[in-house]
Image: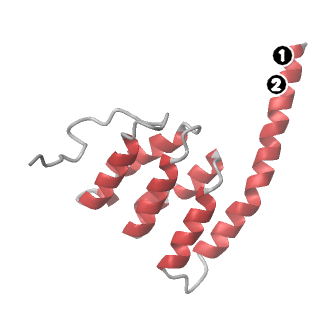
Amino acid sequence: MTLTAGALIGLLALVQDAKDIQPAILKFTQDYYKSGADLDDKISAVNYLGQHRHEKVVRVLSPLLCEASIPVRIMVARSFARFCNIDLAPRELLNGLHSQANAGKKQMSGRICSHLERPSTRCSLAVPPSVAPRRRTP
């Protein structure tokens, strides 16, 4: 009986959580996709939505890892590095690292790798040496 009650309370918390995040997603969509939005507007919209740690936020921002300009991609990667309690964020970072859109962009792959191998976060993943950028030693 208590297991059922606990599951029901957990489900209600998830529904309430989803209702709380919808206004932030709507504001992000309006700010990011408005006509005439310059790079600063887009970066501030990503930063605003990145403050909300939720799986839906990861799902909204993850296409930008491959579609947006390089500065916006970097801000999305930085936001995902702070999403340590959400398992989807490091997976999306890894997908962004392997995507064709980021192939050949050393700045982007270096940033994603640095966020993936950050030891201070729970979401650090083992980045294979063939993918990780090589650091020069003096």
Residue beneath disc 1: 3
Is any part of residue 101 visible from this angle?
Answer: yes
Q: Secondary structure at mark 2?
A: helix
Observer able to see residue 100: no
Quadrant of residue 124 within the rendered picture: top left
The answer to whether mark 1 and mark 2 are in CB contact below 8 A is: yes
Find residue 134 and report its horizontal and vertical position in percent.
Answer: 18, 46
The amino acid sitting under disc 2 is Ala
Left or right? Give the position of 117 relative to 18. Answer: left
Residue 6, given in percent of the width and then of the height, sits at 84, 23
Quadrant containing the N terminus is top right
38 or 101, nearer to the observer: 38
Residue pointed to by mark 2: 7
Relative placement, left or right, of 53 versus 18 is left
Q: Position of residue 94 (x, y in %)?
A: 39, 44
Q: Residue at x 41, y 61 (%)?
A: 74
